Amino acid sequence: MSLLSPQIVAFIAVIEEASFERAAKRLFVTPSAISQRIKQLEERIGQLLIIRQFPCKPTLAGEKLLSRVKLMSLLESEVMADFLPDESTIVHSNTFSIAVNEDSLSTWLLSALAFLYQKYGYQFDIKIDNEDFTLENLKNGHVIGALTSESRPLQGCVVHNLGLMRYCAVSTVDMFNQYFSNGLTPTAFQRAPMIDYDHNDFLQKRFIEKVVGQEILPNNIHYVPSATGIVEAARLGMGWCVTLEGLLGNTLETGQLINIAPDISLYAPLYWQCAGIRSKILSQITQAIITESKQVLYN
């Protein structure tokens, strides 16, 4: 049973499943029924809402609608739990979408999500992006909350300051001796191979500028889009990198890696932004994230 219209339920399912066929299986109806419901909704709204391709994506109008109805779906879960406690599994079957940075996911966030699953049965659909870009997922309605570097709240959202992520620069001893034996100079940074997360990651460039006071473009850059993969690439001697301290494990203690600038760290603020609605579920998710982040982030 759903308190939302079949058209809205179908719309959410198509976006989340990225397919009319998969949405049909999820809702136990035929693909033609899903197509008919979407068509009825588009006729009612007067705009095209879904781009018919694989994966299906919302149009700009669809994103605007999604940002409203996702919250309706969240509140519906709470209503069903309050008025139909015998059907509380409806709440547990809901999947809540959040956007996070991979550094947090690879270090502390899963503990918070595991607690929420074990206590309340909540399931999560996690969208990964750089913390400078996760907010776009909240803006377009794809998620109910996001870990972000942005302190200014989106319209209709609230912000919680989680703390600071601390990053350091590491390499193998051989890599350091080969390129940095004469110091962390502009020439050394230009020559030394560097490991970057992707083309939107600016940590390495920020570190270089902090050390030498100018922007340097290294001659050799590896792009490794994995938080743990960057550390492994550095351990294997592919270059030096800037990484979250929590991702290093015991590599410093065992000598597999060294901190090439022990006195220099980069700090990046992290915030939790979520929809500013009175929701028990959203409050529980927020509290779990705040509690866990305080164990590992710096104030």
Image: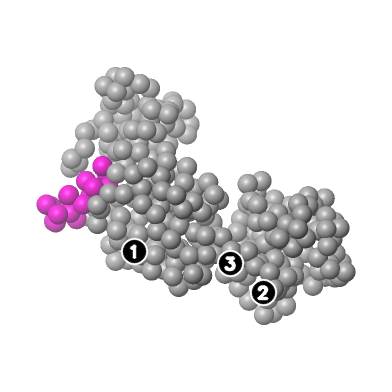
Q: Secondary structure at mark 1?
A: helix
Three-letter amino acid code at the position of disc 1: Gln
Q: Position of residue 162 (x, y in %)?
A: 44, 63
The amino acid pointed to by label 3 is Arg
Res 24 visible = no
Q: Which of the two discs, 2 and 1, sits closer to the camera?
A: 1
Q: Position of residue 130 (x, y in %)?
A: 55, 50
Q: Earlier in the sequence, mark 3 or mark 1?
A: 3
Q: Position of residue 216 (x, y in %)?
A: 78, 52
Q: Residues within 10 Å of mark 1 (few under 14, many from 20)?
A: some
- CA distance for labels 2 and 1: 32 Å
**What residue sits right under mark 2 in the picture?**
251
Q: Secondary structure at mark 2?
A: loop
- Residue at image position (30%, 61%) is 284
In the rendered image, residue 46 lying in the magenta stretch gets the answer no
Q: CA distance from mark 3 to mark 1?
A: 22 Å
Q: Crowding at label 2, few (<14), some or many (≥20) Cα neighbours within 10 Å?
A: some
Q: Report the mark closest to the observer, 2 or 3.
A: 3
Tag of residue 80 = none
Name the residue located 23 percent from the left edge and 47 percent from the top edge.
Answer: 75
| Residue 287: numbered disc | 1
- Colour scheme employed for the rendering of this structure: one colour
Asked if labels 1 and 2 touch by Cβ distance under 8 angstroms, the answer is no
Write the residue at 81% across / 69% down: 176
| Placement of 295 over or under 209, stated as above or below | below
Compared with 183, 34 (above or below) is: above
Magenta range is: 72-88
Residue 51 lies, in percent from the top left, at 44, 26
Instruction: Name the residue nearer the viewer: 97 or 286.
Output: 286
Q: Which mark is residue 166?
A: 3
